[in-house]
Image: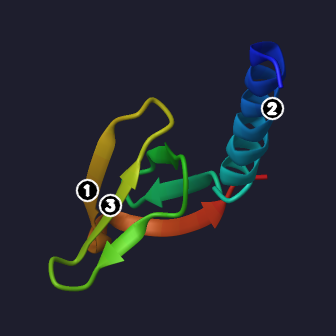
Amino acid sequence: MSNSHILAGTVALLCLCGGALSGCSTPTAIQLIDGRELHAVDTPEYDEESGFYEFEQIDGKLVRINKDKVLSIKAMN
């Protein structure tokens, strides 16, 4: 098997894996009680111990928001 065939197979595998992973995320809108709306790459995780939602915004910034500040969390279509 030539190097070009190995490279083509590797690229194809990476594309398949990347597509599968990106299909698992659910972009989410988080509406805050002050009227602001934040957009998350995926559904926020809730930490019961701290009472905070944790998520990554579309721009890559990691955010923690107190549950009392959240009005709603909805999947974006």
Q: Residues within 10 Å of mark 2 (few under 14, many from 20)?
A: few
Residue for point 39% across, 61% down: 33
Residue 66 in which image quadrant: bottom left
What is the number of callouts on the image?
3
Q: Nearer the viewer, mark 1 or mark 2?
A: 2
Residue 16, x across and y down, in percent: 79, 43
9 to the left or right of 64? right
Q: Nearer the viewer, residue 22 or 13?
A: 13
Residue 51 in which image quadrant: bottom left
1 to the left or right of 40? right
Residue, disc 2: 9
Q: Amino acid at mark 1?
A: Arg
Q: Which residue in the rendered view is the most extreme toward the bottom?
A: 48
Residue for point 40% across, 70% down: 45
First in sequence, mark 3 or 2: give its number.
2
Q: Amino acid at mark 3?
A: Glu
Residue 26, x across and y down, in percent: 65, 58
Colouring used for the render? rainbow
Q: Are marks 3 and 2 in contact (CB under 8 Å)?
A: no
Residue 63, x across and y down, in percent: 29, 48
- Calculate the distance from the C-alpha at mark 3 to the C-alpha at mark 2: 37 Å
Q: Nearer the viewer, mark 3 or mark 2?
A: 2
The kind of secondary structure element at disc 2 is helix
Residue, disc 1: 64
Residue, disc 3: 54
14 to the left or right of 47? right
Q: In what quadrant of the picture does the N terminus appear?
A: top right
First in sequence, mark 1 or 2: give its number.
2
Residue 49, x across and y down, in percent: 16, 84
Query: Image height check: is 53 above or below 20?
Result: below
Q: Are marks 1 and 3 in contact (CB under 8 Å)?
A: yes
